[in-house]
Image (cartoon, rainbow, N blue to C red):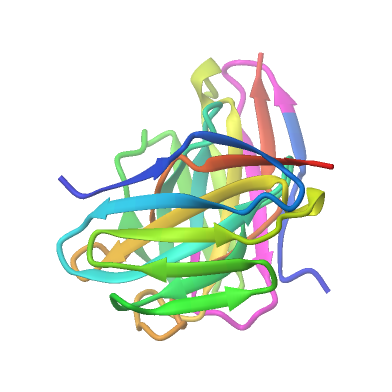
Amino acid sequence: DTAVSQTPKYLVTQMGNDKSIKCEQNLGHDTMYWYKQDSKKFLKIMFSYNNKELIINETVPNRFSPKSPDKAHLNLHINSLELGDSAVYFCASSQRAWAGQGQETQYFGPGTRLLVL
Amino acid sequence: EDQVTQSPEALRLQEGESSSLNCSYTVSGLRGLFWYRQDPGKGPEFLFTLYSAGEEKEKERLKATLTKKESFLHITAPKPEDSATYLCAATSLSWGKLQFGAGTQVVVTP
């Protein structure tokens, strides 16, 4: 069984379009995250939700809007896509946000490769 | 400024040639130091968490150690299947989030 899953795996779209990426975890975790990995493979956190509540919101353009319908799902909607949005987006989850002793260990999904043309 | 720096950027090893990867961190109040492995086209896979200086953890040919300023990932007698990018990340008492280094790409040739 896949612990953290993302759809779609690949997304190719035109500049200016709006797109969504979905994430689901079946680990029973309370906390979920979105990361962006750029062409230099550097992973940077974008957002985090704990039990459907936004707890981390990094300096991300407001064209990016996360939505958590329940604690097992965290979706990412991107409006007016730009060339610079091309990257790999990873979803992750952890048992807790920062409880220590392993509960904050994050488990990652397979990634969504977004290419904006 | 809090940051996580990994070295070297890339490492090419012969099968059986042991080596170490470095992760240095400047973090006020380290909560945890994490090691992940990432294969091409896949998400990071969790390897270890270290919480205090002097702590060590092992898994097969990998051993992670932690001091007050850095962590090492030792690869003993590597095999080609150990080829991957190894990522280190830290959380601090004040952040509540993982800050990643840029990774070390390891290639092990037969």
Part of the protein shown in magenta = A12-32
Q: Give the number of marks.
A: 0
Q: Position of residue B14 (x, y in %)?
A: 73, 42
**B84 or B3: nearer the viewer:** B84
Residue that appears at 76% across and 44% down? A8
Q: Position of residue A94 (x, y in %)?
A: 51, 73
Residue A53 shows up from this direction = no
**B51 or A10: nearer the viewer:** B51
Dividing the image into 4 quarters, which one contains the N terminus of chain A? Answer: bottom right
Residue that appears at 74% across and 25% down? A12
Query: Does residue A6 lie above or below A64 as drawn?
Result: below
* Quarter-of-image position of residue A18: top right
Dividing the image into 4 quarters, which one contains the C terminus of chain A? Answer: top right
Residue that appears at 43% across and 33% down? A63
Residue that appears at 66% across and 31% down? A114
Q: Position of residue B98 (x, y in %)?
A: 38, 59
Query: Does residue B44 lie above or below A54 as drawn?
Result: above
User: On the picture, is B95 further left or further right than B78?
Assistant: left
Residue B105 shows up from this direction = yes
Decide whether residue A23 is among the magenta residues: yes
**A40 or A71: nearer the viewer:** A40
Query: Does residue B3 lie above or below A55 as drawn?
Result: above
Q: Position of residue A14 (x, y in %)?
A: 67, 17
Decide whether residue A28 is among the magenta residues: yes
